[in-house]
Structures are given as C-alpha cells and as structure tokens.
Amino acid sequence: MTPPRPTPSHRRGAAVRQAVLEATTELLATEGLEGTRIADIAARAGVHETSVYRRWGTRSKLILEALSHRLDSELPRPDTGSTHEDLTTFFTALAAFLATPTGRALARIALDPQDDDTQAAQLRGRFWTDRLDRAGHLVRRGIERGDLPRETDPEFLLEALAGPLHLRVLQRGQPTGRDHVRRLVDLVLAGARSALPENHECHGT
Amino acid sequence: MTPPRPTPSHRRGAAVRQAVLEATTELLATEGLEGTRIADIAARAGVHETSVYRRWGTRSKLILEALSHRLDSELPRPDTGSTHEDLTTFFTALAAFLATPTGRALARIALDPQDDDTQAAQLRGRFWTDRLDRAGHLVRRGIERGDLPRETDPEFLLEALAGPLHLRVLQRGQPTGRDHVRRLVDLVLAGARSALPENHECHGT
DNA sequence: GCCTTATCGCAAGTCAGCTTGCGATGGAGT
DNA sequence: ACTCCATCGCAAGCTGACTTGCGATAAGGC
C-alpha cells in the first residue's frame, strides 16, 4: 500500500504534490488563512519553497486546490423526499462548514479576486460552478417532482440561496444556523413557486 | 474657490487627508485595485508614504474610506410608489456601480477579510450596515404601505437581494442588468409576501 | 511674535509573496 | 546498466506592504 520508496532524499512528482497539499490543509486548519505562509508549508512538507511556486504559482491557487475537493466530502447529499428539507440540510451543512477555520479560508480564497489573471479567475469560476451544480441536482429533482415550477432556473435559485449565506459569513464572520437557513429556503422557494404565470399579477407598475 | 494657501512646502492635516483621498480614487479608477500602490498614491498626492500609513494604517482601510462615501452619491433614492420598482431601481444601480472598476474595487475591498484585526472588521461591518440601511428605508416604507407583511425583516430581505448580486459580481465579474435584478426582486418579494401566516401551508414536511 | 506640539518628511529596515538562474538528482525509456 | 530530461534544491534578488526613530515645520495658544 505505502509506496516502496518511503522517503528518498528528494521526493518527486506526485509525492511532492501530495505532501504540499497535506501540509497546506493542516496548517490552514491550525494557523488559519493569514497564518499559513508558504515558507511554513514548504518546510512542513519537507520541500523547497521554490517547488511550491513552480507548481502552483500563487498562494491563492495552492490553497484553493488544497481545499476545493474537501468541500465535496463535507457536504451531504440529502434525499428526504422534500425539496425544502433537502435544500435546508444541504445549505445548513454548507453554512456550518463555512464557520470552520478551513471553511472560512476556502470561502475567502474562492471569493477574493486578489489576483486578476485569467487562470485564477477560471479556477474560481469552475469552483463555484461545480459547487452550485452539486446543489443543482436537488433543485432539478424538485422540479421533476413538481415541488418547483418547470420554468425554475436552478442556477438562479441557487445563487439566491448561496449569495445571502456567503454575504453573511464574509460580513459578520458568524456561523449561520439551521433556523436561519430554513428562513432563507422558505423565502426563496415560496418566491419560486409564486413566480408561476398564474399568480403573476401583484407587481406594481 | 481655491484655498488661500495654494501649496505650502508641507501640507498639513485636512489638506493632506483630502489630497490622499483624491489621489486614491483617481488611481483606483485608472489603474484598478491591484495597480494602486500606496507609493503611487503618496507620490500623486505630493505626500510622503509614511504619512499615509500613519493616518490609515493599511491599504484596505484607506481604499475603503476613499470609496465608501462615493457609493452614497452613486445610489438613487427611488420613490415611484411601487416597492417592487423602487428596489429594482436601487439594486440595478448598485449592480451597475459594482460593474465599474471603482465599484468592483470597493466591493472587493469591503468583502476581503485580508486583515483580521478588529478595527478593520468593524469598518467593514459598519460599511455594509450603512449601505443596507439605506435600502432598508425602501423596505420599511413598503411595509408601512402594505406592500410587504408586517413581520418582514428588512435586514434579512436585503441580504436576500444583495447577496446574490455580490456573489454574481465577484464570481463572474460581469455586470448584472436590470432584467436580472428584476427577476431577483420578483423572487424575493414574492417569497416575502407568501410568508404570511395565512398562505403558510405549502412546505413539504 | 514666540513657544509648544501634533504632524510631516526622510531614511533605513522588516517581512512575506514571488521570480530566476544554475547545478544536482531521480525516474522513465532504451 | 546507461542516458536523458523533467523536476527539485539552493541562493540571490525583486517588489510592495508596513514599521520605526529622528529631525523639521506648520498651526494653534499665549
């Protein structure tokens, strides 16, 4: 199981990659986002600083890659039969994860456009698309089930749910509990349902 | 018009403050957020770098102060008689401003928790509170007018509106047009209205 | 008009992210 | 077993944010 070559004087390729990634997630959890210096990461991984920069380019990209897959394992795939309940569970878990040091680091790195270069932007874009897409399954199932109108735009609806959550976390830095998430899901789902053409008569002007 | 003392060898107090603030907003508009170095700001303001740091402490705080009042002048105070229309107008203007280099810089700086110290956090908190409070007037008027239920939580409703907008801007960096804002307002207001006790029967489980 | 003091200019320096050139080495292919 | 090349370690350096001690000066009080 463990590779036959335990620790050659100089590790190579995938070995370096994994060591750095692990060191990054560990430091992120213990030291927080600003406490995690790449010099420390390199030292803990038993790798030279230069190797880190050559492979990932910037601190943001490294942290984003180190943490992005972690979100997936942290989020549930609820299937309670109720779209409302599924979404509440999913986004409550998201909010809870966002309240952890690791989660906060992820959210901040993923939102922070500190580097404007195209690659980083694509990384962030793909990241959010992937996450939203995962929750998108819940919404699409809700549509098929008849809980939501056929015209419902999953992406739009998910933005309406994820946006306020992130704004809250980034703004106040406080965990957002299940009750709050439930209120949000209440609001958004009720809004999506009444967006049906038939009830479309209440807007002024 | 121009102050009686054109340019003493060393400007002091308010004069320095204003010069730096102006230089900051100008550079922000032309050079963008990352292109705006405090060394350049100081040079353009005809002031020494040290003075900037002594007065504002960090780059973030300076930029936040330089731009925050600008948002106020950029945002309308609509009063069309329709709460829906008022909110659409207000948040469309917000989205439009967020699409400008200056607006993007503001949003990023205000959201970016790159410095965790208490003062900066309070600055950001107060900033968002002030902005939301301004829109809060529209919501409260809507409640008094009977457009919205009495139980409506203005802050919660505004987060539901502002959150998705910010997520979109920060995520894709694309302007969010009036049509999109209108959809959002549709969704959120419809949700807020149907949150009335009387129609409270549609959630699964 | 003088004197005090907060404010400013200036120089020197720290720190962390990031870059570059070069020499060494390990892994893959023959 | 040998060669080749991508990858790594290392040293040196750059940049920009941020700090500090000291001397100079403008602005307000007497």
Image (cartoon, coloured by chain):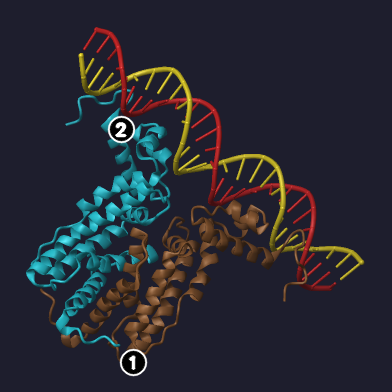
Chain colours: A brown, B cyan, C red, D yellow
On the image, the x and y values in percent for residue B109 come to 36, 53
The residue that label 1 is drawn on is A145
Residue drawn where x is 35% and y is 76% of the image: A158
Whether residue A24 is situated above or below residue B28 in the rendered picture: below
Residue drawn where x is 21% and y is 85% of the image: A196
The residue that label 2 is drawn on is B16
Report the side of A133 relative to B190 (left or right).
right
**Of residues B119 and B49, which is closer to you in this image?**
B119
The kind of residue on which mark 2 rests is Val
Q: Are marks 1 and 2 in contact (CB under 8 Å)?
A: no
In the image, which disc is placed on residue B203? none
On the image, the x and y values in percent for residue C1 come to 24, 7
Q: Residue extending furthest bottom?
A: A145
Report the side of D14 relative to A14 (left or right).
left
Rate crowding at label 1 as few (under 14), some (14 to 19) or many (20 or more) other CA atoms within 10 Å: some
In the rendered image, the quadrant that contains the C terminus of chain A is bottom left
Whether residue B3 is situated above or below residue A139 in the rendered picture: above
Whether residue D14 is situated above or below residue B143 in the rendered picture: above
On the image, the x and y values in percent for residue A155 come to 35, 77
Residue drawn where x is 25% and y is 73% of the image: B184
Rate crowding at label 2 as few (under 14), some (14 to 19) or many (20 or more) other CA atoms within 10 Å: many
Q: Determine the CA span between mark 1 and mark 2.
A: 64 Å
**Of residues A174 and B100, which is closer to you in this image?**
A174
On the image, the x and y values in percent for residue B169 come to 34, 64
The kind of residue on which mark 1 rests is Arg
Quadrant position of residue A201: bottom left
Q: Nearer the viewer, mark 1 or mark 2?
A: 1
* Chain bearing mark 1: A
